Amino acid sequence: MTRKELAMNYFKEGYNCAQAVVLAFEDLTGMDKSTLLKLSSSFGGGLGRLREVCGSVSGMAIILGIVYGYDDSSSHEEKSAHYARIQEVAHKFEEKNGSIVCRELLGLATKHDSPVPEARTEGYYKKRPCVELVGDSAEILDEYISNHPVK
């Protein structure tokens, strides 16, 4: 199964958009599933359903931070290189989907949403592009990682 398919399946299992993307790359993290799920749990619905940056885009950033991130606050070069990689994948997502903002991707007029997630029904999946967006993020991230081997 591809990482794209894995991410889409995780979303269909009920994980939020960020968690679905993160779990599809679990094998690259050296972290246990529970920790990854907790780490990414706040980013669903565009950051706790605030409808800001799409959670699947945040999921890409989480994995890129784990795999390529920097830990030296004084290293301007590392910080710049990392931000460039985040922008690269975010731009690819935006090129494909028109935005990286959750509410824009969902066509919502309101900026903030109720903190209570909707039930994952057949109707939910019909009116939301989230499964496909999660798949797009996993595919973009998989391509990035394939072209930028971890040192």
Image (cartoon, grey):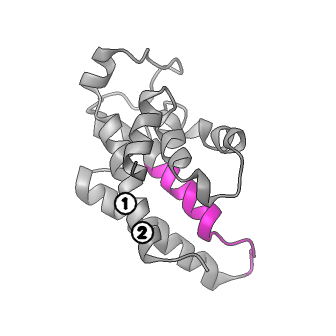
Q: Between residues 35 and 110, which one lies in front from this camera angle?
A: 35
Residue segment shown in magenta = 57-74
Residue 144, disc:
2
Q: How many marks?
A: 2
Which residue occupies 44% across, 43% down?
Answer: 7
Which residue occupies 53% across, 57% down?
Answer: 61
Say whether residue 24 is visible. Answer: yes
Image location of residue 128, percent across then percent down = 29, 29
Q: Which residue corresponds to mark 1?
A: 140
Query: Secondary structure under badge 2?
Result: helix
> What is the crowding at mark 1: few (fewer than 14 residues within 10 Å), some, or many (at least 20)?
many
The picture quadrant where one finds residue 30 is: bottom right
Which residue occupies 24% across, 23% down?
Answer: 126
Extreme residue in the front direction: 1
Which residue occupies 72% across, 43% down?
Answer: 35
Left/right placement of residue 140 relative to residue 95 reads right
Pointers 1 and 2 in contact (C-beta within 8 Å):
yes
Image location of residue 34, percent across then percent down = 70, 38
Task: Report, in whole angstroms, how far the alpha carbon at label 1 lies from the one at label 2.
Answer: 6 Å
Query: Secondary structure under badge 1?
Result: helix
- For the stretch drawn in magenta, the main secondary structure is helix
Amino acid on which disc 2 is placed: Tyr
The picture quadrant where one finds residue 77 is: bottom right
Left/right placement of residue 100 relative to residue 58 reads left
Amino acid on which disc 1 is placed: Ile
Is residue 67 rendered magenta in the image? yes
